[in-house]
Image (cartoon, rainbow, N blue to C red):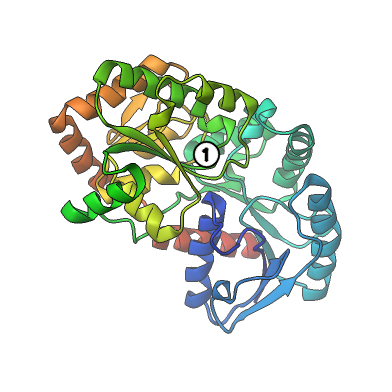
């Protein structure tokens, strides 16, 4: 059996949510199925650490696909040619992009349709590409995978896809995310926030991550609490907008916000596990891996009551209205002032985290692969 895989998001030290899904599932599937030939299609030089076994053949295809015009060239010309040479039994695309000009069976993982609901959050050409091509990818795919029941229903409603064509497979969380204690917490806080406790945000600094209202809520929290708690923001400013910039500059307590950029996996674990709480108040998510990572670390979570986040968090987090700064700041005050609430959320979070692990994700993705090939 031959399986070709779109692995363009496997980039060393730059894995995001979809990149982690790709890494964690493929690493397990490749090693569990040495009888299968895998062809990993990269759009640039790859790190050898992503070649998970002797049954993987890496293929570098130009040009690097990081722009809508280059997306079209890469998938419709470079990938198309490669697939015609490989003749795979399946083309697996963990980021949902497909080659429309080939006829091989395909399994596309569409994580969410945020661009359909909030198109103005994206640059014009990117917005056009997503809204033009993703309905076509969804219809062309032999089978689809998505990461929440919310996203499945959204794909059905937006693209008129039959429910039986879509498998829901939840994300896992990095097994290295475990609690830290005592001196280690003090050391991490000393390193990042001059020893102060902090709320943490982890994610790309994208409009849908709702930094505008998070900054406003943190300002309100600080004005009411008069403590030394800071806000630690982890992520690249790739999608930083003028609206976010204006809100940040208008903050009364902007000096209490610490930006540390993208962190390596070990540091990300440490800053998450040393936080007072995670503030993950996006207004649209297909899943939300930082919620589970925080649960695994024994860190309380404040998250949104919309899209997939209640499905993922269950009763183990404080759910807030992401469009209401008071709702977010009140949750921050509750976390800061009520140790019994924190302990309750930590206990519930540990239990909730048991439902999500990458071994299950990989097994279920393999089942979807087989289903796609056989049918």
x, y (%) of residue 61?
78, 67
Q: Quadrant of residue 81?
A: bottom right
Asked whether the viewer can see residue 83, the reply is: yes
The residue closer to the viewer here, 193 or 203, is 193
From the viewer's perspective, is residue 355 above or below residue 163? below
x, y (%) of residue 365?
52, 59
From the viewer's perspective, is residue 141 above or below residue 309? below
Q: Is residue 217 left or right of residue 163?
A: left
Quadrant of the snapshot with the N terminus: bottom right
Asked whether the viewer can see residue 353, the reply is: no
Crowd tier of the residue under label 1, counting other residues whose Cα lies within 10 Å: few below 14, some 14–19, many 20 or above:
many
- Give the residue drawn at x 28%, y 56%: 178
Q: Is residue 215 left or right of residue 41?
A: left
Q: Is residue 261 left or right of residue 218?
A: right
From the viewer's perspective, is residue 126 above or below residue 142? above
In the rendered image, the residue lying farthest to the bottom is: 54
Q: Which residue is mark 1?
A: 286
x, y (%) of residue 227?
24, 26
- Give the residue drawn at x 26%, y 23%: 333
x, y (%) of residue 235?
51, 44
Quadrant of the snapshot with the C terminus: bottom right
- Give the residue drawn at x 72%, y 61%: 105
Q: How many marks?
A: 1
The residue closer to the viewer here, 370 or 271, is 271
Instruction: Look at the numbered disc 1 and give the secondary structure of its residue.
Output: loop
């Amino acid at each position: 059996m031959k399986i070709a895989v779109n692995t363009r998001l496997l980039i060393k030290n730059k894995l995001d949510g979809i990149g982690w899904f790709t890494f964690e599932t493929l690493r397990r599937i490749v090693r569990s199925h040495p009888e299968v030939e895998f062809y990993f299609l990269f759009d640039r030089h790859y790190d050898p650490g992503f070649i998970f076994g002797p049954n993987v053949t890496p293929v570098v295809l130009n040009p690097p696909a990081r722009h809508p015009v280059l997306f079209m060239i890469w998938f419709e010309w470079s990938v198309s040619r490669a697939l015609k040479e490989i003749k795979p039994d399946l083309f697996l695309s963990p980021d949902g992009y497909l080659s429309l000009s080939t006829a091989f069976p395909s399994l596309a993982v569409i994580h969410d349709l945020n661009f359909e609901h909030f198109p103005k959050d994206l640059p014009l050409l990117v917005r056009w590409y997503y809204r033009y091509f993703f309905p076509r990818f969804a219809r062309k795919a032999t089978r689809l995978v998505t990461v929440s029941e919310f996203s499945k229903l959204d794909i059905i409603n937006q693209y008129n896809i039959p429910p039986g064509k879509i498998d829901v497979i939840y994300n896992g969380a990095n097994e290295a995310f475990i609690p830290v204690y005592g001196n280690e917490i003090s050391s991490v806080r000393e390193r990042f926030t001059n020893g102060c406790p902090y709320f943490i945000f982890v994610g790309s600094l994208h409009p849908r991550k709702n930094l505008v209202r998070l900054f406003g809520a943190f300002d309100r929290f600080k004005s009411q609490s008069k403590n030394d708690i800071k806000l630690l923001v982890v992520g690249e400013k790739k999608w930083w907008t003028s609206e976010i910039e204006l809100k940040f500059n208008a903050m009364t307590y902007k000096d209490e916000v610490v930006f540390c950029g993208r962190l390596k996996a070990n540091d990300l674990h440490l800053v998450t596990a040393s936080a007072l709480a995670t503030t993950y108040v996006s207004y649209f998510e297909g899943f939300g891996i930082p919620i589970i990572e925080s649960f695994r670390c024994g860190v309380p979570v404040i998250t949104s009551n919309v899209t997939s986040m209640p499905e993922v968090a269950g009763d183990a987090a404080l759910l807030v209205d992401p469009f209401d700064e008071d709702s977010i700041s009140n949750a921050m005050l509750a976390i800061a002032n009520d140790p019994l609430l924190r302990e309750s959320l930590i206990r519930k979070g540990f239990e909730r985290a048991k439902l999500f692990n990458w071994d299950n994700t990989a097994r279920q993705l393999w089942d979807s692969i087989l289903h796609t090939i056989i049918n």
